[in-house]
Amino acid sequence: MVTDLAGAQVDAGVRVVVACPEGPLAGAAAARGAEVRVWRATRAPGPNLRDEVRQVAGLVADVRPDLVHAHSAKAGLAGRLAVRGAVPTVFQPHAWSFEAVGGVTEHLARRWERWATRWTDRVVCVSEAERRTGERAGVDASWSVVHNGVDTARFRPAPAGPARAALPLLAALPPTAQVVLCVGRLCGQKGQDLLLRAWGPIARQLPQARLVLVGDGPDAGQLRAAAPPSVLFAGAVADTAPWYRAADLVVLPSRWEGMAVAPLEAMASGRAVVLTDVDGARESLPPGGALHCLTPPEDPGSLAAAVSALLRDEPLREALGRQGHQHVLSTHDVRGTAQAIADVYREVAAAPHPERREPISQ
């Protein structure tokens, strides 16, 4: 999402500087025309946080931006600690930090999100559901809701069969094989373990079906050890678009989200989707899509039933794919998202901006 948004902003004539660790995001952002500054940081807060915050402060001092847009929990933490209101600041959680943890850590994360609004000119949520989750947690912020968008020129429909020939992992599958695709980091949030639990009944009913997991992450070893032969692992890939076009159905069994991007990419590619009913899922689907495409979270039985039903019903699957494609074109094109974010930037930049650099100890 950050890459597509940065590319759309560059296309609109905005100077975009992306601060991130070396890796796929840095390369993709540079390819889209953004300036990239290396930020040596880990995914989660840890003993190096103080140094990571100092790096952000140095980058901000060097770049001298008109506005700082911090994406996700870690950058939201480090960015706001570094800037502390000295520059207009937009924070976009992409799912709240306190949803990923429990116990004392969850309590501390909620307190941080409530406290950090003093250094946040606008909180941008990717769904109304995500905003409501923040409000229920006591986050008292100036809110905007801007739904996620995808590059509809890159993610587009194509016949599934011919698309598989270009992917070595799938090229040898028989023509009768049905491919169920899950794209996402292999971690607890994305729920691939739940999908593997659901896959047993699916594979018994539909032995020609294959589940393909695209992505890498901390749970990769555990998932591989638990997977039957009908589950294929693609690992991390540079471009997910060909994988959507090779699929018959796309599934994302997340435990929490703000609004997942993978289902939007899948629908833009003309593929039917099955999602768990977490924040943003209902808002991402076309009207009426919840009937066939939404299942309760943490419910492998319901997930198996929904996937099996759609694999058996090709006309319905194709109709849902066409409907989803049109929905993304009209509602989730990244150019519309970029325009809405630009409107937020203008509102934030035009508002009075008093100095708010309270000491960290307060």
Image (cartoon, grey):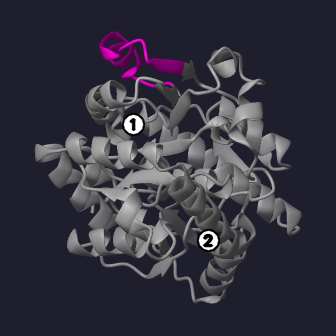
* Residue at x 58%, y 49% (from the top left corner): 57
Q: Is residue 134 magenta?
A: no
Q: Quadrant of residue 149?
A: bottom right
Residue to which mark 2 is pinned: 327
Looking at the rendered structure, the kind of residue marked 2 is: His
* Closer to the camera in the image, 290 or 129: 290
Residue at (86, 69) in percent of width and height = 12
User: How far across and down, in percent of the image, does residue 175 sit?
Assistant: 65, 25
Say which of marks 2 and 1 sits in front. Answer: 2
Q: What residue sits right under mark 1 in the picture?
A: 44
Q: CA distance from mark 2 to mark 1?
A: 35 Å
User: Residue 26 location in percent, x, y?
Assistant: 71, 37
The residue sitting at 70% across, 67% down in the picture is: 333
Residue 162 falls left or right of residue 285: right
Residue occupying the point 31% across, 25% down = 204
Name the quadrant of the C terminus: bottom left
On screen, residue 20 versus residue 256, left or right, reads: right
Range drawn in magenta: 216-233
Q: Nearer the viewer, residue 274 or 68?
A: 274
